[in-house]
Amino acid sequence: MFDFEKLDIYKKAKHFNASIQELLRAKNVSTITTNQLSRAAFSIVPSIAEGFGRFSKRYRKNFFIIARSSVFECVAILDIMKDNNILSETEFRRLYDHAETLSKILYTMIRNLENK
């Protein structure tokens, strides 16, 4: 097992991606939205893994910033989907809360790399 596979953030990111993929299979969403949201949610996971593979704090931090930016992209797309009545408030809130948790953990990881 690789070290990153043991991390809570990695497991949470995988769960978030699985939730997004499940949502996209269940909803009638445009191809553009499906592709954009699918790619954004998917990219969080490998960005975290790649960050843990870097020895330089600067490069590690950069991948965590990329992962966090992808979380933000997901939230923006989910917000538009809610506005377009594709997502209920409950569905949106569940995914939003999960994304917020990811964002907070990644933010702390980024900040910890700045302080060293």
Image (cartoon, rainbow, N blue to C red):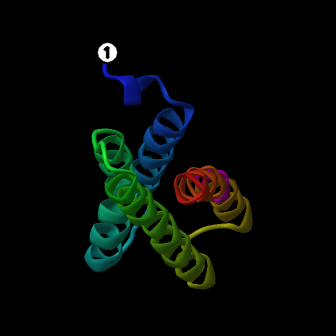
Asked whether residue 99 is drawn in magenta, I would say yes
Question: In the image, is 59 to the left or to the right of 70?
Answer: left
**Magenta stretch, residue numbers:** 98-102
Asked whether residue 92 is drawn in magenta, I would say no
Most extreme residue toward the top, as rendered?
1
Q: Position of residue 107 (x, y in %)?
A: 60, 59
Identify the main secondary structure in magenta.
helix
Q: Residue at x 39, y 30 (%)?
A: 4
Q: Which residue is mark 1?
A: 1
Question: In the image, is 66 to the left or to the right of 108?
Answer: left
Q: For the N terminus, give its image quadrant.
A: top left
Q: Position of residue 69 (x, y in %)?
A: 45, 70
Residue 108 vs residue 67, the one in the foreground: 108
Label 1: which secondary element: loop
Question: In the image, is 58 to the left or to the right of 11?
Answer: left
Q: Position of residue 42 (x, y in %)?
A: 33, 53
**Residue 103 position (above or below residue 4):** below
Tag 1: Cα neighbours inside 10 Å, few (<14), some, or many (≥20)? few
